[in-house]
Amino acid sequence: MRRALWINLVGVNMVAGLVAGLLLLPELYRFDTLWQIRLMVLGMPLLVALWVWQMVGMWRGAGLEPLPSGRGNLIRAAVGTAAACLALSVASGAGAVADMASAALGRDTLGHYALTARADGTLVVQGDIGFGLAARVRTALRESPSLTRVQLDSPGGRGGEGALLARVIREADADTVVHQGCFSACAFAFLGGHRRSLAPGAQLGFHWRRRALDWSELELRSQVRRAFRDAGVDNEFTAHALAVPIEDLWIPSRRELWAAGVITSPDFDAYPIPHFRG
């Protein structure tokens, strides 16, 4: 019984933790979330199988030898509760898994974006913030050192990809600018700029989805908070930006953005862009 519990409680959890940890490290995929998503789609059935095997092993182990009064029933009750939680997690995550599977096949519902490199050193990013965008921007900036500025105009998209794009832009020490509007996940990406500015009339918009705080949600929130923190944004501003529900959109004034450190100059002309155009 003790050996079975050791294998099922310690061994399986160590393997599952290692697999889950590897699947969630963007550096291993050179920031290419499409490859990460593909491996996650393949890895999740393995994790579920491991957890099922763990629970079956513990259930059977509880009857292998006599146990003190009530302990076997207690183990079975714990296994039953764990099985119910696993089934609930699988059911509640079915939609997200289907979305990930679709993205893994190249059919991301939020992946319609376009990149354009301009002669003035600007890489223009337009469209949705979808899986794989950070990797494409990273490749473009590395292959063309003359690109020192990223122009972002997007209605938003995937928050995790936006935070990852912020890291890519920061790694390249590039500036960010907005010509028209940059909202939701796009606003997270904007924070990666060394110098961050808005064209006259341009807007930044913030909000955050409200979901049950499971482990993946906490990890995503941590990535997004890191984007704010690395940009030196005021903590009070960050808290407010991430408290706005997904059905609303907070568009701070230029004065608020400057005071909080979101933009590095209140005046767009401080960072002139030659031949700027949309």
Image (spheres, rainbow, N blue to C red):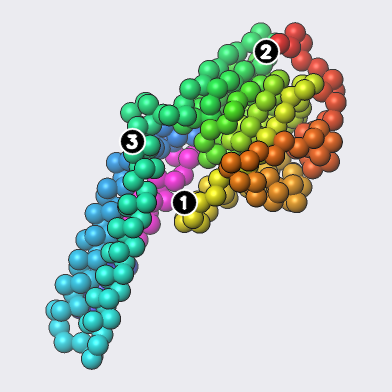
Where's residue 226, x and y in %?
63, 46
Q: Quadrant of the N terminus?
A: bottom left
Mark 3 residue type: Ala
- Residue at the disc numbered 3: 101
Magenta stretch encompasses residue 19? yes
Residue type beneath disc 2: Gly
> Mark 1 to mark 3: distance in Å?
17 Å
| Relative to 49, residue 159 above or below | above
**Counting residues from the N terminus, which is met first, the one under dot 1 or under dot 3?**
3
Q: CA distance from mark 3 to mark 2?
A: 34 Å
- Magenta range: 13-28
Q: Secondary structure at mark 3?
A: helix
In this picture, residue 254 sits left or right of residue 76? right
Give the residue displayed 53% in from the left and 29% down from the top.
129
The reply to whether the C-beta atoms of the residues labelled 3 and 2 are less than 8 Å apart is no
Relative vertical location of residue 109 with respect to residue 222 in this rendering, above or below? above
Secondary structure, mark 1, is helix
Q: What residue is shown with label 2? A: 278
Farthest residue toward the front?
247
